[in-house]
Image (spheres, rainbow, N blue to C red):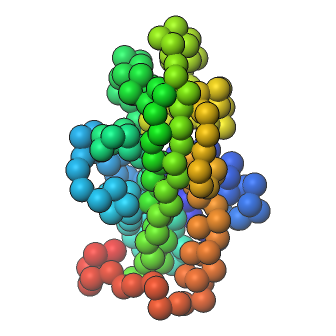
């Protein structure tokens, strides 16, 4: 059975919708520090996903899934907002602009692991301050990367999307299903952790 190293209800819902049997074991690691992070965004989310999977995988032989999502706009990285003021700041920055949503995936079983990621482009329509304020008051943005939930009330913020919708929700199902099939077949893309690293 798959083990999901995430507390995210959205990721659980997506796995259930795909008919994937799983159980949840929350990761021991904290959310990866992303504010102001530089470098390759795909590497950032893949490393964070692997850290979450590794924190759960010790002593287990099941396949563990770790995932991490960030939003990137004009080279700035947005994770989950610290508070309502931070959520307002993020949404004002995204207003009227395109941004990218990156989700890193890590599958880990014993010493074998596989990493992947998905990137989706999302455009926000221009938002008035009062619209941002009303949305933040709902509380929905406070535990979401980029301070919005496309599958919830945040859908009204979005003008266009290019790429995988479930990636924006928090788990790119098509990419995950490909990776799971490859991993279970013992394909060459899976690598081995260094000794003592699991």
Nearer-the-camera pick, 16 or 137: 137
**Apparent side of residue 140 relative to residue 89 in the rendered image (left or right):** right
Residue 122 in view in this figure:
yes
Quadrant of the snapshot with the C terminus: bottom left
- Percent position of residue 141, x then y: 51, 27
Q: Residue furthest top?
A: 130
- Percent position of residue 193, x then y: 33, 81
Number of callouts in the render? 0
**Which residue is located at x 52 percent, y 64 percent?**
65
95 lies above or below 44: above
**Apparent side of residue 109 relative to residue 192 in the rendered image (left or right):** right
**Apparent side of residue 62 relative to residue 19 in the rendered image (left or right):** left
- Percent position of residue 160, x then y: 61, 40
Nearer-the-camera pick, 69 or 23: 69
**Which residue is located at x 56 percent, y 47 percent?**
168
Quadrant of the snapshot with the N terminus: bottom right
- Percent position of residue 140, x then y: 56, 25
**Which residue is located at x 49 percent, y 36 percent?**
144
The quadrant where residue 146 appears: top left
**Which residue is located at x 37 percent, y 52 percent?**
28
7 lies above or below 84: below
């Amino acid at each position: 059975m798959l083990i999901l190293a995430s507390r995210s209800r959205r990721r659980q819902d997506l796995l259930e919708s795909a008919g994937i049997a799983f159980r949840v074991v929350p990761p021991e690691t904290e959310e990866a520090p992303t504010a102001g992070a530089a470098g390759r965004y795909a590497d950032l989310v893949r490393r964070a996903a692997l850290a979450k999977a590794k924190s759960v995988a010790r002593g287990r032989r099941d396949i563990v899934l770790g995932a991490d999502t960030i939003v990137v706009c004009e080279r700035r990285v947005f994770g989950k907002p610290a508070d309502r003021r931070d959520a307002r700041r993020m949404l004002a920055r995204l207003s009227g602009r395109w941004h990218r949503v990156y989700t890193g995936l890590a599958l880990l079983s014993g010493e074998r692991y596989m990493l992947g990621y998905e990137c989706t482009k999302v455009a926000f329509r221009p938002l008035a301050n009062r619209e941002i304020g009303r949305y933040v008051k709902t509380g929905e943005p406070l535990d979401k990367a980029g301070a919005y939930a496309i599958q919830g009330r945040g859908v009204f913020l979005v003008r266009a999307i290019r790429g995988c919708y479930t990636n924006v929700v928090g788990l790119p199902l098509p990419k995950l299903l490909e990776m799971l099939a490859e991993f279970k077949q013992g394909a060459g893309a899976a690598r081995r952790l260094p000794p003592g690293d699991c």
